[in-house]
Amino acid sequence: MRLTVFICLVFVLFVAHAEARPSEETRAKLRESGQKLWTAVVAAARKCAERVRQRIEEYLEKDNLGEKIAEVVKILSERLTKRIETYVGE
């Protein structure tokens, strides 16, 4: 009795699996829609990055902060270079 129920259950699961498997046409459509989605996500990320970059530039243009920050970065990089040279020299 259990063997019959088990065989029927396996048969039903096999039929359900065969019916649920997507066709090649459906797979192609899924791939195409996935590629479109990925393209849209990448485009949205680029737009966000561009907006952030633009707002940062606008913020730094106030009071000429961009030039001041560039000078500070230059000084810090020179200090770092000197420290590295002293550590390597020891």
Image (cartoon, grey):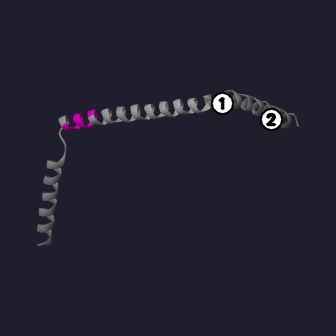
Q: Nearer the viewer, residue 34 or 52?
A: 52
Q: Which residue is mark 1?
A: 63
* 47 displayed left or right of 21: right
**Alpha-carbon span between mark 2 and mark 1:** 33 Å
Label 2: state its secondary structure. helix
Identity of the residue furthest to the bottom in this view: 1
The reply, left or right, for residue 33 in relation to residue 38 is left
Look at mark 2 in the image and give the residue it sits on: 84
Provide the major secondary structure of the magenta segment.
helix
Q: Nearer the viewer, residue 33 or 89?
A: 33
- Give the total of numbered labels: 2
Frontmost residue, 70 versus 4: 70
Residue at (43, 35) in percent of width and height: 45
Q: Is residue 39 magenta?
A: no
Which numbered disc, 2 or 1, marks the residue closer to the eye? 1
Above-or-below relation of 79 to 15? above
At 25% from the left and 38% from the top, the residue drawn is: 30
Q: Quadrant of the N terminus?
A: bottom left
Which residue type does callout 1 highlight? Asp
Helix, strand or loop at mark 1? helix
Q: Residue furthest front?
A: 63
Q: Please check the rendered image and state whether residue 29 is part of the magenta-colored stretch, yes or no.
A: yes
In the rendered image, residue 46, in percent from the top left (x then y), is placed at 45, 31
Span colored in magenta: 26-32
For the C terminus, the image quarter is top right
The image quadrant that residue 22 belongs to is top left
Identity, as a three-letter code, of the amino acid under mark 2: Ile
Residue located at (16% from left, 60% from top):
10
Q: Residues within 10 Å of mark 2 (few under 14, many from 20)?
A: few
